[in-house]
Amino acid sequence: MSAGRSTLHRLPGADLRQLITGLRWLYAPDPVMFGYALRTTFSSLLALGIALWMELGSPQWAALTVWMIAQGTRGRSLAKARWHLFGMVLGVIFGVGLVAAFPQAPMLFIVALACGIGLFCMIGTFLPGPATMTNYRIHGMRATGFTYAIVSLDGIADPGHIFRIAASRATYILLGIVLETTISGLFQLRLVKRTRAQLADNFETALSGSIASLCALLEGQKEALSTARSLFTTITTLGDQVEFAEVELGRATHAGDHARAALADIAILLARGFDVATLMRVPLATSETFNRQAHVLRDFLQTVPDRLRAEPDASKILDDLRALRRTCRHDVTDALAAETEHPAHFDPHTPDAAHDSLVRQAMLHHALIALIDALRMALMQFDASRVAQPHDHFRAPIRSYRNWPQAAVNSARAAVTVFGAGLIWVTTAWPDGLTFLMFVSIACSLFSTLERPALATKAFFHGACCAALAGGVLDLALLGTPTTFELLAFWTGIAMLLGGLAFAYPPLTLPAVAYNLFLPIMIGPANSGRTNEITYFNTALPLVLGLAYATWMFRVFLPYNVRHQRQAMRAHILHDLRRTARARTPPDTDDIVSRNVDRFVRLLTNAGNTPAPIIETYLGGILSAMRVALWVRRLRAIRHVGLIPPPAQRAIGLVIGRMSHFSGRYSGHYGRTLRATRLAIARLRTCERMTPQLRTRVALVAALTGLDIIAAELDENRAFFDTHNEAPENSDAGTL
């Protein structure tokens, strides 16, 4: 009883402390983000004041535009402003065309409006953008739909003045863009130097985490696998920021391309570390020589981050890596030379455990060479990003992965939602139905390109409700009869500053975006007088109902199905494995790695309430498929060179042939592929024992390394690769 009483006494204090911690963004904000909130509030009020001075019809849209494009860094603001301007131009053109085409046909107008927003969402889904959706090319299409909606819906009420309306909307959007980018640029001192330092810090952050995981893998720690997998999210997040650094550095340098390639090479480095860990789990694989070499490599890896910070370039580190590579290469040849000393070496029918151990040691050293090569490539790219290279034409563009089914779903979801809102307006003859339709169109334009728009619109709805409440306080209490712009700016600035501070707190970021966007609309400033309570309620009600309707539609019409998306992702992964095996020109290494890392991050981001065993199985399957694809590509190259004997070439060809039908149309190919891989391993072992030429045996060891890894991954991740398991997610025993 006393224990229960003490627990009850502790709860209020704990809740109070949690509440105080949760409000830290308000009473103890980060100085940098406080500067962002203050700067953006000033820019927004300045845009509002200029729009009022110019006597624009809806000056609140200038302030809204500032908040829409304002970001924490100069590069983000410029990138978003550029694509917002692009989207504004397209939106104005299409909006004028829509009103001109259907000025007296409301149903055709609604259909065309819905189809246009759906089309923009489809195009936005296809544009290059990472899993975290921070790339502002996608925002260009969102801004197109946004502007298309506000221009056409304002213009359809007065078609005779559509060009004046469009010019007015374009003017205040352009005003907001120019003011925000100009004022944010005034606060960016030593921008190029800080940007280069940030690129270096990003690489060192990713490399330090990867090196720590690699050292743990080389020590044989099993828990290091799960720790290393989480680094892919970090690599993706840091890679997203490279584009904004490119904007700050300008197009005269290719530092951003080298930085993007360096982060991609770190992902390859982790994949090579997983290969080493897989081979280390095989019996008789490790030896005293390998353990000694792994210890030397661990000691070297731990010094790399500090040396990168201390040395002006990575030339000495690269020289040391080349020396380590030569040592590993000598270990491979020494193991193969020691193998020939056994009497039964050329007799494939005599079992020899010592012979098998030496071959596996050679395979492990070969995997270490691949790991060293990946690290060397990452350091070379990083060095090129730090020091400008003469006549540098290197390019590493952002990769785009088009998902036609996802694009079709996004487009249909947006179009049907907008069309439904238009039907409500037409059938009810609601006087404020156009405002309701406008807010629904804005929500669809902004969020239909996301994979889980219902969650985003829910948070957005909460922020809009806060904007409606804050607008009510300002409209009905504090700004009832303003006489000067200074009074308007004072109270509005305080409300905007709170929204800017909330934007810096991750749990409140999306609600804060809605709050900052809709607060100027709720205030409704104008030169002719203040917004009265009737105007306020006629704006707040359509806003709240519009976002509530959009949130409901995103939940009931083509809702995001976590299980279906996982299964579709697995089908795409298996399709890519087949394409890697049979395509005339297989995908390059960067494409294989970046696509699967993108899937990895998407799966983690959209996991929801999925049981942990299912998520773990999928995560392991994605990374296994990535490594299998890399080795299939390598095996095709080894077979093409022609160094290995014809029987070994035929065995590898059979594996590649089976992989080209892997878990395909008729299923049942998983077992055949695994058997073919094991038979190929046996055949290549025989060829290796019967071949006297050292060069050929080294090539056979490289092929054996890949085949062993493929067989191990297929065997360990059967639940993911075997499509015979049609309902794998119902199992609790480690299956899907």
Image: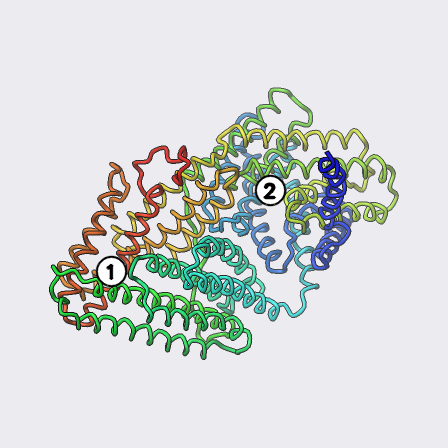
Whether residue 112 is situated above or below residue 450 in the rendered picture: above
The spot of residue 503 in percent (x, y) is 68, 49
Q: Is residue 105 visible?
A: no
The spot of residue 182 in percent (x, y) is 68, 59
- From the viewer's side, name the closer residue of 585 and 161: 585
- Residue 348 located left or right of residue 90: left
Residue farthest toward the front in the current orientation of the protein: 1
Q: Mark 1 and mark 2: span between their CA atoms?
A: 58 Å
- From the viewer's side, name the closer residue of 665 and 699: 699
Of labels 1 and 2, earlier in sequence is: 2
- From the viewer's side, name the closer residue of 448 and 292: 292
The spot of residue 683 in percent (x, y) is 16, 57
Q: Residue at x 45, y 62 (%)?
A: 216
Q: Residue at x 34, y 33 (%)?
A: 726
The spot of residue 404 in percent (x, y) is 40, 40
Q: Secondary structure at mark 1?
A: helix
Residue carrying label 1:
704
Residue carrying label 2:
147
Three-letter code, disc 2:
Thr
Three-letter code, disc 1:
Leu
